[in-house]
């Protein structure tokens, strides 16, 4: 990232090259310091555009939970984790448990999210398109979604910013 021109170090501080992103990042850190309720709900993510690779910065609050209850003053109010943007969405076990997904449904969900549509997923999984469609319909029913894009969005919501 430092070599990609996305971030740099100045006076022992991390600086974002893009002005708008730098402002958004500063606003996120300020919101965390001010204990903004939006930040307490899980932080935010910002896209950092590099020359060859895009990155995502996850800003997570350190001001809630046990720290907030302790009532002390802490210099660090948030943490920032930066990683390359990945098209591969890992299937979170929490999502599988929350919706009671079978192993076959999990494989279809992962294929839809990471490979694409029904024909491509069926080919990759080595099953008929009708099989993928059947499991996809069960996924829609179990998750309350009706489109593949909504299913992928739901999966992304369960993905940990720390898992890669």
Image (tube, rainbow, N blue to C red):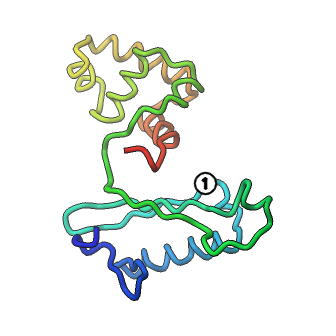
Indicate the position of residue 114 as horizontal and vertical percent values: 31, 35
| Residue at the spot 74% in from the left edge and 54% down from the top edge | 66
Q: Residue tagged by mark 1?
A: 42
| Residue at the spot 40% in from the left edge and 26% down from the top edge | 109
Q: Is residue 161 left or right of residue 118?
A: right
Q: Is residue 60 left or right of residue 10?
A: right
Occupied quadrant, residue 107: top left
Indicate the position of residue 21 as horizontal and vertical percent values: 42, 74
Indicate the position of residue 141 as horizontal and vertical percent values: 55, 20
Mark 1 neighbour class, 10 Å CA radius: few under 14, some 14 to 19, many 20 or more: some
Q: Nearer the viewer, residue 78 or 30?
A: 78
Q: Nearer the viewer, residue 119 or 109?
A: 109
- Secondary structure of the residue carrying numbered label 1: loop
Occupied quadrant, residue 73: bottom right
| Residue at the spot 39% in from the left edge and 82% down from the top edge | 19
Q: Nearer the viewer, residue 74 or 96?
A: 74
């Amino acid at each position: 990232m430092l070599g990609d021109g996305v971030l740099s170090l100045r006076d022992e501080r991390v600086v974002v090259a893009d002005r708008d992103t730098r402002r958004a990042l500063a606003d996120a850190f300020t919101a965390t310091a001010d204990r903004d309720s939006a930040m307490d709900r899980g932080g935010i993510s910002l896209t950092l555009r590099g020359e060859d690779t895009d990155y995502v910065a996850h800003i997570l609050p350190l001001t809630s939970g046990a720290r907030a209850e302790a009532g002390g003053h802490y210099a660090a109010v948030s943490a920032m984790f930066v990683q390359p943007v990945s098209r591969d969405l890992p299937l979170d076990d929490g999502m599988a448990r929350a919706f009671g997904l079978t192993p076959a449904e999990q494989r279809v969900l992962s294929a839809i999210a990471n490979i694409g549509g029904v024909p491509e997923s069926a080919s990759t999984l080595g099953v008929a398109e009708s099989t993928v469609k059947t499991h996809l319909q069960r996924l829609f029913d179990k998750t309350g979604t009706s489109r593949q894009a909504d299913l992928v969005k739901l999966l992304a919501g369960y993905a940990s910013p720390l898992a890669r």
